[in-house]
Image (cartoon, helix red, strand yellow):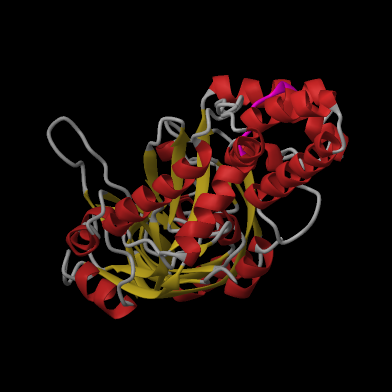
Amino acid sequence: MLEEAAKLLEEQPLCDRCLGRLYARLGRGWNNKDRGRALKMSVIMWLHREAAEGSVDAKKRFRIVASNAGEVGRELYKHLYGEDPGEARCRICGSMLDKAIGELAEEAAKVLRLYDARKIVVGARVSQEILEAEDEVKARYGIKYGESIKAEIRREVGKLLRDKHGYTIDFDEPDAMVIVGFPSLTVEIQNNSLLLRGRYWKRGRMISQAYWPTPSGPKYYSIEQAAWSLLQLTGGETVILHAAGREDVDARMLGTGRPMILEIKNPRRRYISLGELEEAANKGAPGLVEFRFTGRASRRDIQIYKEEAQGKAKVYKALVLLEEPVDRDRLKAAVDTLKGATISQWTPRRVLHRRRNLLRRKKVLDMDCTLLHSNLAECIIRTEGGLYVKELISGDEGRTSPSLSEALGVGATCVELDVLGVEAPDIELLEERGSK
């Protein structure tokens, strides 16, 4: 390895970091600057000994290496021979890397203060010219134990941000990603969203989940709009609601509330107590929409949350208008046929314009209906997630079977629908899956 390093330094000017990086996977607990300096010192001592013992060739090689190795060889050569061999710029980084790492860390710390970030991860963008120069050196000398300049920049800038500025390096759930550029010396921050786990209640009708813009303004008021009051507190740009399922725009969400993850994009403040966040959120639409936060969420939770919601039970209260009067016994008999039944449902006609026509089979777990008038009933229905309750009542012209209308032999329409209960995805399961 010493001979290889000597050959490298005879043919290529390399700074301490760029030489040491070619042997980054050898040894432990050292940085590449230490490796490079140690190799240079060893090569210089070797050539010094050879020259001191009378080798003319060693003196010539010493002069070249002293120039290509920088300060560690140059000063000794000047002392021994009274001649300055000069100092060549590093073949790979132009002798800029060591200084650049410190400058990038300082600039990154300055920018990070604007984002209330504590947990970070560092990325690097390096010019193609430098990457090609590094690859050429590795290929030419058959280097087997090196690492990339990108990896070194990421690690060393991260270590400075951790040790000098107190940031935590978190590869799983960072508050922000710091992307540093070399040799451009640019710093870019990708500020991650603030994710809050909890539930919401919708106590009014004609309120959608997501913001629904039209040329004349929002089509409906939305849960997301109600949460906009969080933007002033957090300095975020917008709010996105990720819910465990959804209720129709004309249905209320009562009872247990609906499990959700609320995402605040690009927040300038994130380390705020849940109580303060909840108080701010509930100023958005008091009396109509209520939020309750139970903790922070991670990005990987969102998809798992939505997938889990498909299998969770829901409880509904439906006000049912019948086209003809029926008596209690007839209603009870119809309900008994639906309890425990598996319902075959084609995608309802009312949503075919935005959803594929698929056949679903979902189970009615429990059902109880009370006759309020000869043609008006109130039904409490517990179903598997994903069953369309309005169509369970009406039959949707035969697209849902069996249905209450089919069992009664009388046309039935859900005129009001409330969601009373939505089982939450298993938090422990979320965490277990997320860790895999």
In this view, 58 is above or below 337? above
Q: Is residue 95 magenta?
A: no
Identify which residue, 218 or 128, lies in the foreground. Answer: 128
The magenta-colored residue range is 11-15
Could you tell me which residue is drawn at 41 percent across and 45 percent down?
Answer: 104
Question: Residue 54's quadrant in the figure?
Answer: top right
- The x and y percentages for residue 6 are 79, 32
In this view, 272 is above or below 144? below
In this view, 426 is above or below 30? below
Could you tell me which residue is drawn at 63 percent across and 48 percent down?
Answer: 33
Could you tell me which residue is drawn at 59 percent across and 40 percent down?
Answer: 75
In this view, 312 is above or below 138? below
Whether residue 344 sits left or right of residue 46 in the image: it is left
Identify which residue, 130 or 83, lies in the foreground. Answer: 83
Whether residue 312 sits left or right of residue 241 in the image: it is right
- The x and y percentages for residue 419 are 40, 67
Question: Residue 309's quadrant in the figure?
Answer: bottom right
- The x and y percentages for residue 50 are 85, 36
Identify which residue, 175 or 291, lies in the foreground. Answer: 175
Whether residue 347 sits left or right of residue 433 in the image: it is left
The outermost residue toward the left is 216
